[in-house]
Amino acid sequence: MFAQGDTGWDLAVYNKDGQLVLVVQVKGKLNASAQWASQLRSNILAHGIYPKAPYFLMVFPDKFYLWANEDAQLDISEPTYAVDARPIIQPYLDKAGITQGQTISSQSLVLIVAAWLSKIIYNELPLGETDEQERWLVDSGLYAAVAGGSFDCEAVA
């Protein structure tokens, strides 16, 4: 059994009842295809050293890949959602003074994703009032799963 703080993932998100619902792996690679991300996910999960969760989010500076199928834990399935990450992370880059074309470290990207997840977890807006570009969060069930929850940030601890 893994306790909060012992997951090994870059970010681990728990629902309001303390159950692990989302694990996040952050990579600095640009232009990672869905197939490449699927193979990496399969390799990570095959080692069995990290706890599994119903949602798996692989984050790249330009793409988010979400698997929303807890039954497909070890296969090389395609992600359920492939999302352009730039509109999501750009406001955070702007606030940090990072201009387009500058590289961003994986650790910095973890902090940005943690800030973005905090906005979702602690958002008090009704479910239907989320930003349209983040509609995939609602459609996948992830928004409801993490709302009111908490997270651990392993990479910056």
Image (cartoon, rainbow, N blue to C red):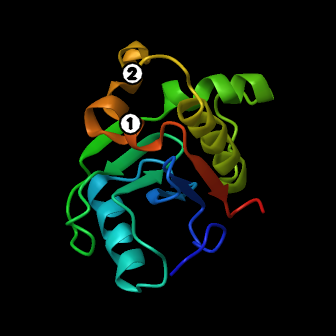
Residues at badges 1 and 2 in contact (C-beta under 8 Å)?
yes
Of residues 71 and 63, which is closer to you in this image? Answer: 71
- How dense is the environment of label 2, judged by Cα within 10 Å: few (below 14), some, or many (20 and up)? few
Residue at horizontal 70 percent and vertical 52 percent from the top: 105
Is 115 left or right of 135, judged from the image as shown? right
**The residue tagged with tag 1: helix, strand or loop?**
helix
Q: Residue 97, located in which quarter of the rendered image?
A: top right
Residue at horizontal 36 percent and vertical 48 percent from the top: 65
Type of amino acid at the residue the image marks with label 2: Leu
Is 154 left or right of 53, judged from the image as shown? right
Of residues 121 and 87, which is closer to you in this image? Answer: 121
**The residue tagged with tag 2: helix, strand or loop?**
helix
Of residues 23 and 43, which is closer to you in this image? Answer: 23
From this viewpoint, which residue is outermost toward the front? 17
Q: Which residue in the protein does label 2 denote?
A: 127
- How dense is the environment of label 1, judged by Cα within 10 Å: few (below 14), some, or many (20 and up)? some
Q: Residue 114, located in which quarter of the rendered image?
A: top right
Q: Position of residue 142 (x, y in %)?
A: 37, 41
Q: Position of residue 128 (x, y in %)?
A: 35, 16
Residue 101 vertical position relative to residue 106 in the rendered view, above or below: above
Q: Position of residue 115 (x, y in %)?
A: 66, 37
Tell me the number on the disc at residue 144. 1
Q: Residue 53, located in which quarter of the rendered image?
A: bottom left
Residue at horizontal 42 percent and vertical 47 percent from the top: 31
Q: Earlier in the sequence, mark 1 or mark 2?
A: 2
Residue 19 vertical position relative to residue 63 in the rendered view, above or below: below
